[in-house]
Amino acid sequence: MIGIFGSGQLGLMLAEAARPLGFECVFLDNNTTGPASLVGKVYPESEFETFCETLDVASLEFENTPLDLAQQLEDRGVLFPGVKALRVAQDRLIEKRTFLALDIPTTGFYEVQCSDDLIQAAKEIGLPMVVKTTRGGYDGKGQYVVKTAHDIEAAWSELGANSPLIAEAFVDFSREVSLIGVRGRTGEFASYPLVENHHAGGILSHTYAPASNQDQIIEAATAKLKTLMEHLDYVGVLTLELFETAEGLLANEIAPRVHNSGHWSIEGAVCSQFENHIRAVTGLPLGSTQITEPSVMINILSKYPPAADLLKIKGAHLHHYHKSERADRKIGHITLSNCETPDDPRLLAIKGILPHAPSF
Amino acid sequence: MIGIFGSGQLGLMLAEAARPLGFECVFLDNNTTGPASLVGKVYPESEFETFCETLDVASLEFENTPLDLAQQLEDRGVLFPGVKALRVAQDRLIEKRTFLALDIPTTGFYEVQCSDDLIQAAKEIGLPMVVKTTRGGYDGKGQYVVKTAHDIEAAWSELGANSPLIAEAFVDFSREVSLIGVRGRTGEFASYPLVENHHAGGILSHTYAPASNQDQIIEAATAKLKTLMEHLDYVGVLTLELFETAEGLLANEIAPRVHNSGHWSIEGAVCSQFENHIRAVTGLPLGSTQITEPSVMINILSKYPPAADLLKIKGAHLHHYHKSERADRKIGHITLSNCETPDDPRLLAIKGILPHAPSF
């Protein structure tokens, strides 16, 4: 029995990968009616003790897993990945410092404790810069873009209550890519091809797997990811998000879990990111991360498309998360198999069907 | 909500294919703790009314679905496939006569109402012959092989209580193959490549997908299957089992459902038999039945192999049904991807790991 912190669509897809391997899953989440509730019991945090007694191995689908609870499971020797990785992933300052310590190129940053620090940050890293809370925030929330010195006051008044903050240099990138690695209990390491991510409004819109023209950069990026996972004594799937710039790849952030940019691997890789995470945390040998066919993953936001129109498109796979519709909410995704170019007419057909109109 | 008669592994895998399309499943089975109970509520037959009220569409994973209950759902217009197909599939005599009526070559047979009929059958179709109950029986149960006239009495005394029986000519076949088709609500038809099945002790041991050397026979077989499905006003997946003989393909029997010989399609086809069945019965467009990579499916009988050993083998996918171990029980299967020859050394490795030692 695998216990998972969180009960969203990542938990659902982890459980779907776990079952054929002979495992069942339970979840810990105060929202007990999320997608994962379709496939296993969800315990509220008030029943943490029962959750712990039920599980043989613990993992997570949610990087903001409470550290005190995570620590209790780590003390029992059953939590993968461990608290060390969670501490790094939960704090943008620690994360950036970890990148620096491991010689992983990253964006310029500055620690911000007070509004004066913002003025100093602007001098050090230049404008525009992005001011972020060090903890929490996702899909573009908890951020403020400081374009000129006049924005500093407003940035502090919006985010200052959550200080310390981090100011990050605005990166002039040509594209955003991510690299998903998996590390087993015995240190076995594998990684998927680099993929190319496109965001709209701070939310992942779609992913090309593999990213084009990656031959020059994949090797170095993979070596850095391996170093990072070894440093964190990491077990499971970890995602590294990077910017491609004129100076090469810059690490942006990590997610200590399966990732939206790896959903294509269900259909497009020999062994999906979900199955590989389950294999890793249960001590099984890792599966092949080899891509079987180029794929494009497109998120479904806000409103479900008419399934009949979508499924007429050859190679379109629907993943409905059984979530209620709400503006800008990720409620499903589509994997389009055997698609390697943005010019594929099937992508336009999908765009015509999706109510939220993705950015391609 | 899709209601399914039966709650075994086929129900489990149907539900796993249904969820990403936005559907949930419930099941009807007096055994309420089967594999499908992991993914949806199982109602005993005593709660048939509640089961019916819950569902929007009904289907089955079990050809021996009680016809009286099936008829009630058919009367509501929600059962796919319908009672017409079930009547044919549940009775070997009606099945053979349907083959004959549709000009589908099949094995010689003779209806047996009394022991004298067995003597007459032996004259008509020759010895050896296989005597079977017309209803029920699977995996080789409910059968008696009559080799000489001396066996007739014993055959009648073993099976006569279940008469009428059917006597079938013993077929001198070179191999057993099956063809899985799917037909949508609007008559749309698609079929998977022919696959080659190997049995041991009357139970399917392993399947090669695709069957080798099928170019000469697939077209005619597919045309026959299409004719049959149209005749039955069939909606959903139907499996036709055939013998390859010196005289060509002979139809053996049909299964009005997803089939063990189609499990490879989860990894090895663009759209699996399970997803295509769900698409068909819910009125969605069919998915591509194209094979993506040659695969071998191997059943796990009796006892689970050590997962760690199995998953070390590249391209081996485990499907654990969460059933308890019992002699000769199908409790899981393995799909070996990118395997097209019995000489693949990975097959030998799998054989070494499987406690029941499959027949390759």
Image: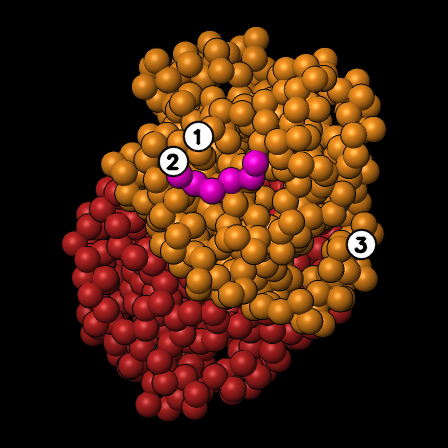
Chain colours: A red, B orange
Residue B164 point in image, percent of width and height: 62, 17
Q: What residue type is labelled 2?
A: Leu
Q: Distance between the residues labelled 1 and 3?
A: 38 Å
Q: How crowded is mark 2: few (under 14 residues within 10 Å), some or many (20 or more)?
A: few
Residue, disc 3: B357
Q: In this view, does A284 lie above or below B329?
A: below
Per the image, label 2 sits on a secondary structure element best described as: loop
What is the chain letter for disc 3?
A: B
Q: What residue type is labelled 3?
A: Ala
Assign the N terminus of chain B to one quadrant of the image: top left
Q: Residue B102 carries which label?
A: 2
Instruction: Between residue A329 and residue A152, name the one nearer to us.
Output: A329
Mark found first going from the N terminus, 2 or 3: 2
Disc 2 to disc 3: CB gap under 8 Å: no
Q: Is residue B7 magenta?
A: no
Q: Which residue lies furthest to the left in this view?
A: A352
Q: Residues within 10 Å of mark 3 (few under 14, many from 20)?
A: some
Residue A125 point in image, percent of width and height: 35, 82
Instruction: Between residue B69 and residue A68, name the one nearer to us.
Output: B69
What is the chain letter for disc 1?
A: B
Q: Distance between the residues labelled 2 and 3?
A: 40 Å
Q: What residue type is labelled 1?
A: Thr
The answer to which image quadrant residue B46 occupies is top right
**What residue is at 36 percent from the left and 73 percent from the top?**
A196
Marks 1 and 3 share the same chain: yes
Marks 1 and 2 share the same chain: yes
Query: Which contiguous range is marked in magenta?
Result: B103-108
Per the image, label 1 sits on a secondary structure element best described as: helix
Q: In this view, does B203 lie above or below B340?
A: above
Judge left or right: residue B351 versus residue B231.
right
Judge left or right: residue A175 versus residue A219.
left
Per the image, label 3 sits on a secondary structure element best described as: loop
